[in-house]
Amino acid sequence: MSDLAGLSAVEQRERLLKGEIKAVEIAKSHLEVIKTKEGSLKSFISVAADVVDQAKSVDNKFSEKRPMGRLAGVCVAVKDNICTSGLKTTAGSKFLSEFIPTYDATVVRKLKSEDAVIIGKTNLDEFAMGSSTEYSAFGPTRNPYAHDKTPGGSSGGSACSVASCESAVSLGSDTGGSIRQPAFMCGVYGFKPTYGAVSRYGLIAFGSSLDQIGPMARTIKDLRIVFDVISGHDSLDSTSVPKDLGLTKKERFKIGIPTDIDFSSVDGVIGRKFDELRSRLAGKKVEFVDVCLPHSKYAIETYYIVACAEASSNLSRYDGVHFTKRSAVDNIEDVFYKSRSEFFGPEVKRRIMIGTFVLAKGYYDAYYQRALKVRRLIRGDFD
């Protein structure tokens, strides 16, 4: 049965619609893999208790000959900073270790509408702040190919669950590389969609002007289907954009090759693969153009200032009063101080302190305001 877990999402759905397999069999296959591998990998913070019941609902829909969704019977792992109704959403933090949302994020609602099975919530660096999935309050995730190495982060659990066949596909979030980097390190496909292409409603905020939810999968076809399902305008997210970005209407694509970025540090194998891809695409309705991105050299510094400033603001709501865990003290000032000291991890504290500093009076113009201006210049280069 565990062989079913190794099939792509497209293959699982096709065999389901042919009546060759049942959604329950697919679900049990993934659960069997989780039982075998999870002890050493730690991809998940929690596995849904109703996985088999979700799958039975899909099978009942099929037996009643009702139209089946694009992800019928496919087990999807969801990063644990994306809200799921009735299922714990911790963001990898002690602060939210008991938080159970009363609603689904828009992306989760869209997955369910296409008959996907939500198999569980994946591990991450606390509040998505990290690049190794080591800064989780629930312990680190291991690389599925080498347990002594990192799977990347912050969506390390999502990448690991797909690579190890614990799930068919997964959702991650990307603020500064948190889908792209673990996808690379775990050997799966993943990308950060254009900001606004996917609704952020129900995503626990890190840097609101940078955060974006995106898919991870073992095949390009699976990646495209999941993206098609979760993308599009959402009235609950004013930053979301219409689904049709005009890409399908283009008869010819331009691909820009930056001429002013030093690629000397790129691994030789990666460089050769890039050159091979460029050769294969040449003449296939693709035009390569040299582009100049002079301000990209300031991108990392700009990112850390903007991201930490927004994190400092967003995380101010975690005070031990509203909906989070609270330190056992009575004085209100001690509640704030001790709760935040006790329940925030070291990396989150560092970023809050940096963000608070760059937003402070006397430093705002010198750091945060200047970073916003440089970001505008970087964007101008790409435009």
Image (spheres, rainbow, N blue to C red):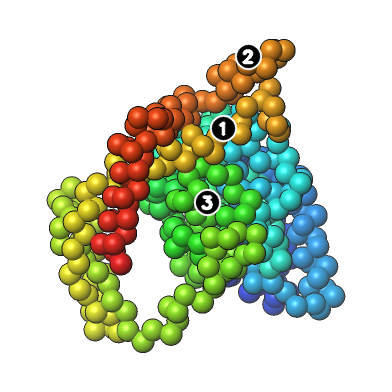
Q: Amino acid at mark 3?
A: Gly
Q: What residue is rendered at 77% in x and 57% in y?
A: 54
The crowding category of the residue bearing disc 2, from other C-alpha atoms within 10 Å (few below 14, some 14 to 19, many at least 20), is some
| Cα distance between the residues tagged 2 and 1 | 15 Å
For residue 72, what is the image quadrant?
bottom right
Which residue reaches farthest front?
362
Image x and y of residue 324, in percent: 68, 30
Image height of 223 relative to 288, above or below: above
Q: In the rendered structure, which disc, 1 or 3, sits on the residue that comes first in sequence?
A: 3
The dot on residue 122 is none
Q: Are marks 1 and 3 in contact (CB under 8 Å)?
A: no
In this view, the residue in front, 320 or 115, is 320
Q: Which residue is mark 1?
A: 316
Q: What residue is rendered at 65% in x and 59% in y?
A: 236
Q: Which residue is mark 3?
A: 172
Q: Secondary structure at mark 3?
A: strand
Q: Amino acid at mark 1?
A: Ser
Q: In the rendered structure, which disc, 3 or 2, sits on the residue that comes first in sequence?
A: 3
Q: What residue is rendered at 32% in x and 84% in y?
A: 252
Q: Which residue is mark 2?
A: 334
Q: In the rendered structure, which disc, 2 or 1, sits on the residue that comes first in sequence?
A: 1
Q: Amino acid at mark 2?
A: Asp
In this view, the residue in front, 301 or 35, is 301
Q: What residue is rendered at 41% in x and 34% in y?
A: 359
| Cα distance between the residues tagged 1 and 3 | 23 Å
Image height of 63 relative to 266, above or below: below
In this view, the residue in front, 151 or 110, is 110
Q: Secondary structure at mark 1?
A: helix
- Position of the N terminus, as image quadrant, is bottom right
90 sits to left or right of 284: right
Mark nearer the viewer, 1 or 3: 1
Image height of 298 relative to 283, above or below: above
